[in-house]
Image (tube, rainbow, N blue to C red):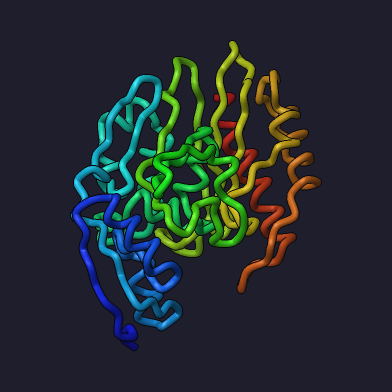
C-alpha cells in the first residue's frame, strides 16, 4: 500500500511548527525519524492532510549536560544515544537499553523524541524515562513546560502533550555514585517489541536499595510502575529472601494485558522472572 495524498512542509524553527499545528490541528502529523509514522501512513492507519518534517531544526538535536540533568534533544537518534560517552557516564541505563531497540537501520533513523511522544507501552525509552525519574520538555504557543515522566503517559498511545505542542527534549537526572540500574526484557526475536520488559533503578545504601523504581514494558496501556513492590524493596538488601518476597508482591500487584500470543498469567510469570533476575544482579 501507499499513503494517501498529503501536503508536506519542512519548517526551520519550532515556532513555525507550532504555528502549523495551531492552523491545521488534527489534520497534521509531525515527522521526526519516521520509523512509526511512515508505516502508519503507508498502511493508511493515519491519513493526515499535512506532514510537518521537523528534521531540519538544529535546536532539537544534541546531547548535553545542563546542570544536574542530561538533556537529550528530541531528534537525537537511538544510535547517537547508544554511542554517546555522555549518556554512558550520566545515564548508563540508556546505553544498556539501546541495543534492544529494533535493528541498526531503525536505530540509525528513529529518534528519542519520536519514541517518547508515540508512547508505545512496549518500547524501551518511555520505560527508561520512567525508571530514571526523567522529565519531558515540550514547547507550544505558551512556551516551554516540563512534564514529569510519571505524569506524561496517560493511556494507550496517549500523553499529556497538547495538540499544539511538540516534544523538544527529555531530561534525565545525572547518575549519582552508588546508583544501580538494570534492564531486562523478553521478546520473540531480538529487536521485536518486548513481550515483557523491565527497566529499574535504585540508589545503593551499603548493601541495601533505596529510591527503587521499577518500570515495566508490555504489561499495561502505558509503561507501568510497580509501586507497591518498590515500597517493599525500600531499604532492603536484595538477597534471595527479598527477591522471593518481591516476586510474590509483584505477582499480586500486576494485572497484565494479554497480547496475540501471551495470556495475562504468562506475562505475570515473565514479569516475576525479570524482576528476580535484576534483583539478583543488584545483589551480586
Q: Position of residue 157 (x, y in %)?
A: 54, 61
Q: Nearer the viewer, residue 48 or 120?
A: 48
Q: Is residue 142 above or below residue 245?
A: below
Q: Quick check: 102 left or right of 84?
A: right
**Residue 162, image x, y percentages:** 50, 54
Task: Using the rendered view, name the quadrant where residue 268 is placed.
Answer: bottom right
**Residue 224: horizontal and vertical position, in percent?**
63, 47
Q: Residue at x 44, y 54 (%)?
A: 117
In the picture, which quadrant includes the N terminus? bottom left
| 76 shown above or below 20 | above
Q: Is residue 201 visible?
A: yes
Between 79 and 62, the residue placed more toward the observer is 62
Which quarter of the image is occupied by the C terminus? top right
Toward the viewer: 66 or 278?
66
Q: Position of residue 35 (x, y in %)?
A: 33, 65
Of all residues, the one furthest to the bottom in this rendering is 1
* Residue 267, picture quadrant: bottom right
> Residue sitting at 43 percent across and 57 percent down?
164
* Residue drawn at 32 percent across, 32 percent down: 87
The image shows residue 191, relative to residue 272, as above or below, that is below
In this view of the protein, can residue 104 be seen by the observer? Answer: no
The extreme right residue here reads 252
Amino acid at each position: 500500500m501507499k499513503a494517501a495524498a498529503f501536503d508536506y512542509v519542512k519548517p526551520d524553527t519550532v515556532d513555525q511548527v507550532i504555528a502549523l499545528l495551531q492552523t491545521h490541528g488534527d489534520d497534521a502529523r509531525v515527522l521526526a525519524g519516521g520509523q512509526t509514522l511512515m508505516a502508519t501512513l503507508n498502511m493508511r492507519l493515519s491519513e493526515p492532510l499535512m506532514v510537518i518534517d521537523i528534521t531540519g531544526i538544529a535546536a532539537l538535536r544534541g546531547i548535553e549536560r545542563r546542570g544536574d540533568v542530561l538533556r537529550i534533544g528530541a531528534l537525537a537518534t537511538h544510535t547517537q544515544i547508544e554511542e554517546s560517552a555522555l549518556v554512558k557516564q550520566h545515564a548508563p541505563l540508556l546505553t544498556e537499553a539501546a541495543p534492544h531497540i529494533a535493528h541498526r537501520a531503525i536505530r540509525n533513523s528513529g529518534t528519542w523524541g519520536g519514541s517518547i511522544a508515540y508512547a508505545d507501552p512496549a518500547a524501551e525509552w518511555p520505560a527508561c524515562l520512567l525508571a530514571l525519574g526523567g522529565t519531558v520538555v515540550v514547547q507550544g504557543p505558551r512556551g516551554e513546560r516540563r512534564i514529569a515522566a510519571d505524569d506524561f503517559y496517560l493511556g494507550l498511545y496517549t500523553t499529556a502533550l497538547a495538540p499544539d505542542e511538540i516534544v523538544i527534549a527529555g531530561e534525565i537526572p545525572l547518575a549519582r555514585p552508588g546508583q544501580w540500574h538494570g534492564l531486562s526484557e523478553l521478546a520473540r526475536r531480538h529487536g521485536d517489541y518486548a513481550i515483557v520488559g523491565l527497566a529499574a533503578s535504585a540508589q545503593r545504601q551499603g548493601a541495601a536499595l533505596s529510591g527503587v523504581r521499577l518500570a515495566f514494558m508490555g504489561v499495561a496501556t502505558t509503561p507501568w510502575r510497580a509501586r507497591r513492590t518498590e515500597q517493599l524493596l525500600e531499604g532492603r538488601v536484595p538477597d534471595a529472601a527479598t527477591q522471593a518476597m518481591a516476586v510474590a508482591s509483584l505477582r499480586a500487584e500486576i494485572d497484565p494485558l494479554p497480547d496475540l500470543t501471551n495470556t495475562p498469567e504468562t506475562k505475570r510469570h515473565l514479569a516475576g522472572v525479570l524482576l528476580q533476575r535484576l534483583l539478583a544482579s543488584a545483589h551480586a
